[in-house]
Image (tube, helix red, strand yellow):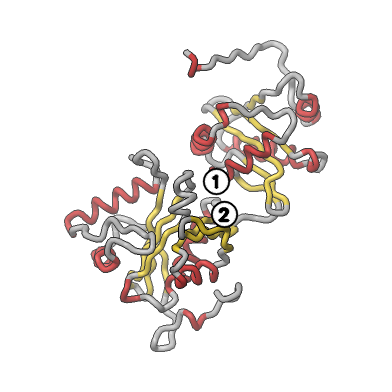
Amino acid sequence: MRNGTFDSRLYTGSNGRMPEIELRECSPQDGYDVLEMLHEIGPGENGFQNSAYNTKPEDFKDLIYRWIDMSRGIGLMPGFVPQAVYWLFADGRPVGMAKLRKYLTGKLRKEGGHIGYCIRPSERRKGYGTIILREMLKKAAEINIPRALIICYEGNTGSRRVIENNGGVLDRIVDGRCLYWIRLDIDTGMREIHPDDYYEIVELWKNTPGVGVSKADSENSILGFLLRNPGLSWCYKDADRIVGTSLCGHDGRRGYIYHTAVLPEYRGRGIGAMLVRKNLEQLKAAGIDKCHIFVFRDNEPGNAFWNATGWTRRNDIFVYSHDICNT
């Protein structure tokens, strides 16, 4: 891709033919040709770490299974996030590896980013860097990452060119690291909330009258909520910003909706109703047949919204709360 246009000349080999490209997630079927590539790559460079560079053949399958577990979030060490490992093949030969982190921690926003990749030394300067990043961005979009953060060293002009060829926009340079963002989601419309949306959505809640933000809305709490309730929480975007949200989850028996919030200037357009309909559709698909909400008594716009959209106010129950951390 050059200035947004695909340029096949970047990828043609010495025989003038484009190689057959395939991106594969690591699997137990991986052969020792992959291990050979890992050995050739070595411990890594330019911020990419390859902990498998000295793996012995007899330990290779165990390594693959650990990576598969990591991609599923099984047995993660503190501070680690689910990460999938991929191989890029050209004409059946492994030429590069890449890692995709499914969401970011504060540390990864400074040092790691969503995607890391490396091309084996014997296959460099053939355009495979641009290809592997392009294919990894497709994988990131498939798991609803709204914006991919790619980080490289300031002096690594080759990597910077690869990122920019794939639409990367330089945000800032910190301690010699270039932080590039690549937009993957829609400009306007409804999409699932992703853990990386946290800072934007919490600001929306703080700026929406009637929405209370508490310790239960910490980054870790919202992350846990979203991971336990995949596909249920949705937001609405307009002109590259989130203007409405509706968190949703269930306990296996009843559904619950929280923080249905639309910025005041976007109300009256049906955005809140659209988000709640999506919540209910997803709950129904999960086998949940009833849903509850909690609304502050003095939240007049909120109470008016729920009354107008077919919800029934209960007068026969009380809600009790207990602050566990003070027990």
Residue 90 found in image quarter: bottom left
Tag 1 secondary structure: helix
Residue 73 found in image quarter: top left
Q: Which residue is mark 1?
A: 196
Q: Position of residue 296 (x, y in %)?
A: 71, 21
- Of residues 234 and 43, the one nearer the viewer is 43
Q: Is residue 311 left or right of residue 162?
A: right
Residue at image coords 45%, 46%? 107
72 relative to 116, above or below = above
- Of residues 191 and 209, the one nearer the viewer is 209
Farthest residue, direction right: 268
* Label disc, if present, on residue 226 of the rendered structure: none
Q: Position of residue 291 (x, y in %)?
A: 64, 27
Q: Position of residue 252 (x, y in %)?
A: 52, 28
Farthest residue, direction bottom: 15
Q: Position of residue 323 (x, y in %)?
A: 53, 16
Tag 1–tag 2 contact (CB < 8 Å): yes
96 relative to 56, above or below = below
The amino acid on which the numbered mark 1 sits, given as a three-letter code, is Asp
Label 1 – label 2 distance at C-alpha: 8 Å
Q: Is residue 256 left or right of residue 41?
A: right
- Of residues 152 and 201, the one nearer the viewer is 152
The amino acid on which the numbered mark 2 sits, given as a three-letter code, is Arg
Residue 186 found in image quarter: bottom right
Q: Which residue is mark 2?
A: 147
